[in-house]
C-alpha cells in the first residue's frame, strides 16, 4: 500500500464528498463524530463491515459482500478498523480502489502533522507486515537449505497475503539445494471461523470481547486465492493444492504418505489448531527438522491457556516433541523447529 492511501487530515477529503465508513465499531463511531464536527459538508452514506449487517449508531450497516459495487463509483470508503491491511486486500480483490485508511493522526489536535511524521508513522505501520514477509521467506529458505523433506502447508488463508509470500518464496528458493518441486497446500473453510464450541475458546479474551466470532475473517474464495497467488508468485498451478472445508474434515483425509517441511498455522482458535496438529503428528506428517510458524501466538494477551499456545503445549506433551525455539516475528508470530517426536520414532523403529 502506498503512503497516499493513509488519511492524515479530514481536510484532505474533497469538498462535499460522499463516504462509507468501513468498521461498525468504536473506530467508525469516532470517525463519524469527527466528520460531523469538522466536515459538515461531507455526507456519510452508511457503514460497511466484513461480517455484520444491520444498524449502528442509527445508520445502516452493510457487509462488503452485500454492497453493490456501484455504491463506490463516486464515493470514498474510509477504513476505520485496526484490521486495515486485511480490509485493503479484500477491497482490492473486488477491484475497489477508492478507499483511504484513517490514521491515528486524524483524532489528534491540531489535525495537521508534519510530512516527516507522516512518513515515520507509515513506516511503523509496515513493520509488522515486513517482519511476517521476512520470517516466512526465511522459513522457506531454511527448509530448502537444510533439505527438510516434504511440502509447505498453510492452515488459514483469508486474504491470501501469507499464502502469496509462501508461494513466492517457494518459487524463489526452488533449486536452492538438491530439493525441487515442493508443493503449497492451502487449507481453509472459506466460510470464516467455525462455531465456537470449545470451553477454552469460549473463555478466551478475543472471543469474549467480540473481536473474534463465528463466521469472522471470511476472506477470498478458493478461486480468488489461487489467482492471487499465481499473479503474485508465478507459481505453477500444478504445485498448488487447495482443501476447502473444516480442518477436522480435510486434514484426516490426507494420504498417509503426506510429509510437511513447513506449517504456517493461522488457526487462531485452540480447537482449530488442535484439529490440525493432532492429526499431523499422529499420522507422522511432520518431517524431522520441520518448521512450524504460529501466526497468532500472542493473541488473547499471550495467555498460555488459550489459542495456539495452549494447543502447542498439549501437543508437545502428548507426542513428547523435541524441538527448538526459532524465535518470534511481528507482534504475534512464533516459530519452532521439530527435531523428533514419539509417534515418529515409534513408527521408524517398527520399520
Image (cartoon, rainbow, N blue to C red):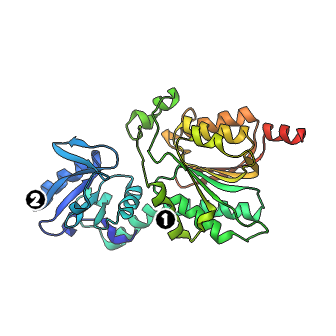
What residue lies at 37% left-to-right and 56% top-to-bottom?
A: 87
Q: Residues within 10 Å of mark 2 (few under 14, many from 20)?
A: few
Q: Residues within 10 Å of mark 1 (few under 14, many from 20)?
A: some
Disc 1, SS: helix
Disc 2, SS: loop
- Relative to 313, is 92 above or below? below
Q: Which mark is residue 137?
A: none
Q: Position of residue 104 (x, y in %)?
A: 32, 57
Of label 1 and label 2, which has the lower sequence position?
2
Residue denoted by label 1: 227
What residue lies at 21% left-to-right and 60% top-to-bottom?
A: 71
- Relative to 166, is 305 above or below? above
- Relative to 122, is 194 above or below? above
What residue lies at 77% left-to-right and 61% top-to-bottom?
A: 146
Q: Which mark is residue 40?
A: 2
Outermost residue, top side = 199
What is the total number of numbered labels drawn onto the structure image?
A: 2
Task: Classify residue 289 as left or right of residue 125.
Answer: right
CA separation in Å, label 1 and label 2: 42 Å
Name the foreground residue: 73 vs 80. Answer: 73
Q: Position of residue 351 (x, y in %)?
A: 89, 42
Q: Quadrant of the N terminus?
A: bottom left
The mark lying in front, picked from 1 and 2, is 1
Q: Position of residue 105 (x, y in %)?
A: 29, 60
Name the foreground residue: 147 vs 310. Answer: 147
Name the foreground residue: 28 vs 263. Answer: 263
Name the foreground residue: 344 vs 334. Answer: 344
Question: For residue 109, which quarter of the picture?
Answer: bottom left
Q: Position of residue 248 (x, y in %)?
A: 58, 37
Amino acid at each position: 500500500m502506498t503512503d497516499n492511501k493513509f488519511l492524515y487530515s479530514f481536510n484532505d477529503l474533497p469538498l462535499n464528498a460522499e463516504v462509507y465508513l468501513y468498521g461498525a465499531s468504536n473506530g467508525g463511531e469516532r470517525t463519524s463524530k469527527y466528520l460531523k464536527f469538522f466536515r459538515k459538508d461531507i455526507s456519510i452514506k452508511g457503514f460497511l463491515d466484513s461480517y455484520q449487517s444491520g444498524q449502528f449508531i442509527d445508520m445502516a450497516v452493510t457487509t462488503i459482500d452485500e454492497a453493490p459495487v456501484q455504491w463506490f463509483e463516486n464515493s470514498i470508503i474510509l477504513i476505520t478498523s485496526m484490521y486495515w491491511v486485511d480490509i485493503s486486500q479484500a477491497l482490492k480483490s473486488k477491484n475497489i480502489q477508492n478507499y483511504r485508511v484513517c490514521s491515528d493522526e486524524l483524532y489528534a489536535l491540531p489535525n495537521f502533522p508534519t510530512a516527516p511524521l507522516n512518513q515515520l508513522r507509515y513506516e511503523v505501520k509496515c513493520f509488522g507486515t515486513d517482519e511476517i514477509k521476512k520470517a516466512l521467506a526465511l522459513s522457506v529458505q531454511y527448509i530448502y537449505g537444510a533439505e527438510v523433506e516434504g511440502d509447505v502447508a498453510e492452515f488459514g488463508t483469508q486474504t491470501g497475503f501469507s499464502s502469496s509470500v509462501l508461494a513466492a518464496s517457494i518459487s524463489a528458493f526452488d533449486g536452492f539445494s538438491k530439493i525441487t518441486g515442493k508443493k503449497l497446500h492451502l487449507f481453509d473453510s472459506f466460510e470464516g471461523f467455525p462455531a465456537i464450541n470449545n470451553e477454552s475458546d469460549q473463555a478466551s479474551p478475543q472471543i469474549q470481547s467480540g473481536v473474534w466470532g463465528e463466521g469472522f475473517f471470511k476472506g477470498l474464495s478458493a478461486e480468488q486465492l489461487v489467482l492471487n497467488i499465481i499473479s503474485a508468485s508465478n507459481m505453477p498451478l500444478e504445485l498448488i493444492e487447495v482443501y476447502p472445508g473444516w480442518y477436522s474434515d480435510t486434514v484426516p483425509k490426507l494420504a498417509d504418505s503426506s510429509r510437511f517441511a513447513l506449517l504456517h498455522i493461522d488457526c487462531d482458535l485452540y480447537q482449530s489448531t488442535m484439529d490440525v496438529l493432532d492429526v499431523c503428528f499422529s499420522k507422522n506428517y511432520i518431517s524431522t527438522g520441520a518448521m512450524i510458524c504460529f501466526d497468532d501466538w500472542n493473541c488473547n494477551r499471550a495467555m498460555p491457556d488459550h489459542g495456539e499456545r495452549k494447543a502447542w503445549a498439549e501437543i508437545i506433551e502428548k507426542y513428547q516433541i523435541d524441538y527448538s525455539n526459532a524465535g518470534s516475528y511481528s507482534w504475534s508470530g512464533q516459530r519452532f523447529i521439530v527435531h523428533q517426536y514419539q509417534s515418529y520414532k515409534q513408527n521408524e523403529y517398527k520399520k
